[in-house]
């Protein structure tokens, strides 16, 4: 049996992210990628693999063995390659979505279904996620929605507003969840303290609704350089994931698939993590489109399996 080495990579958005689908959905010309069955924002594994390969090529060089063994050599003119890459890279899945709030600058919003899925994924990759998922209290009135906040919140208010929705806030011990999430959030100072004040759990149905309808949509135009007015038909709407979004990617490494090469799975995974932590490496990854206008930058933090 082939021995694998596993890790989970946290992606903490520093700028807006547009990982597009390449097709419109009615009013939005350029929507972001989403999971088909629940509508959650995501970044497909193929896009993540491309972004990681590009970053590895910057660090090692395009033709380096570290790149070819991990991601596979370039395709030949006949459409094949010498061997497959040794890395298996999942979709980037949502963990925390920043939502506007009248109660504070914003809230990091998640739900039991998202947390439960992270626990399952962590177990699959051999990583401990030591927290219990709280049961969402039932609302006393059908027009009322409940949100759980940390019992460490200073001066909690009874009402909490996310976008145009009003929730009744109830405090709960979220310390273990906060500790787990903070391990995936790079570059944040006072991460746990910030999560204590801003983490909010809502029901699965409300999270699905908000994550579908509360992501930013921006209008774009193209200006004619001679007349300085908008070019005919050059107006489009683009959806993004906002800064402060937290996603995670599961990565598994096999031993090298190149014939007569003995690079181990652990070395393959180390080659990947080193592109962010080695001396002179950048701890940031660019994913999605619009790189030239500063979009898609994420701070990377990796948790390896024991």
Image: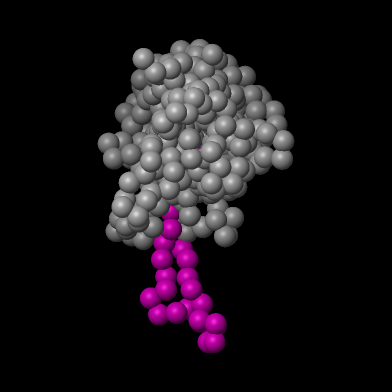
Above or below, 194 relative to 222: above
Visible residue check, residue 109? no
Q: Quadrant of the C terminus?
A: top right
Q: How is the image coloured?
A: one colour
Q: Is residue 110 left or right of residue 277?
A: left
Q: Position of residue 273 (x, y in %)?
A: 58, 31
* Residue at x 49% of width, y 25% of height: 262
Above or below, 125 relative to 16: above
Residue closest to the eye, 21 or 84:
84
Residue 232 image-quadrant placement: bottom left
Q: In the current view of this chain or complex, which residue is farthest to the bottom? A: 227
The total number of labels drawn is 0
Visible residue check, residue 191? yes
Q: Position of residue 61 (x, y in %)?
A: 59, 46
* Residue at x 41% of width, y 61% of height: 237
Q: Quadrant of the N terminus?
A: top left
Residue closest to the eye, 148 or 276:
276
Residue 136 image-quadrant placement: top left
Provide the residue span drawn in magenta. Answer: 219-245
Q: Is residue 28 left or right of residue 177?
A: left
Q: Position of residue 146 (x, y in %)?
A: 42, 26
Above or below, 255 relative to 23: above
Q: Position of residue 131 (x, y in %)?
A: 49, 13
Q: In the current view of this chain or complex, which residue is farthest to the front? A: 260
* Residue at x 44% of width, y 43% of height: 73
* Residue at x 41% of width, y 22% of height: 121
């Amino acid at each position: 049996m082939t021995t694998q080495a596993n890790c989970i990579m946290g992606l903490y958005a520093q700028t807006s992210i547009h990982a597009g689908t390449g097709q419109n959905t009615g009013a939005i010309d350029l929507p972001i990628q989403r999971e088909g069955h629940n509508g959650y924002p995501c970044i497909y594994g193929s896009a993540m693999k491309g972004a990681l390969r590009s970053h590895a090529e910057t660090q090692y060089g395009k033709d380096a063995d570290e790149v070819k063994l991990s991601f596979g050599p370039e395709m030949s003119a006949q459409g094949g390659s010498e061997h497959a890459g040794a890395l298996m890279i999942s979709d980037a899945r949502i963990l925390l979505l920043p939502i506007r709030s009248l109660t504070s600058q914003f809230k990091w919003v998640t739900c039991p279904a998202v947390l439960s899925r992270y626990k399952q994924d962590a177990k699959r990759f051999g990583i401990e996620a030591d927290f219990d998922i709280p049961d969402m209290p039932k609302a006393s009135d059908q027009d009322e929605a409940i949100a759980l906040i940390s019992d460490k919140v200073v001066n909690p208010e009874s009402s909490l507003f996310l976008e145009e929705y009003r929730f009744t806030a109830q405090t709960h011990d979220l310390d273990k969840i906060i500790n787990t999430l903070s391990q995936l959030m790079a570059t944040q100072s006072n991460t746990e303290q910030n999560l204590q004040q801003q983490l909010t759990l809502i029901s699965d149905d409300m999270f699905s609704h908000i994550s579908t309808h509360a992501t930013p949509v921006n209008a774009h135009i193209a200006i004619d350089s001679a007349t300085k007015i908008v070019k005919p038909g050059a107006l489009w709407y683009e959806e993004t994931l906002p800064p402060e979004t937290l996603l995670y990617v599961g990565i598994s490494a096999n031993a090298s698939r190149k014939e007569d090469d003995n690079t181990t799975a652990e070395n393959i995974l180390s080659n990947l993590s080193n592109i962010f932590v080695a001396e002179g490496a950048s701890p940031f990854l660019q994913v999605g489109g619009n790189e030239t206008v500063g979009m898609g930058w994420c701070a990377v933090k990796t948790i390896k399996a024991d």
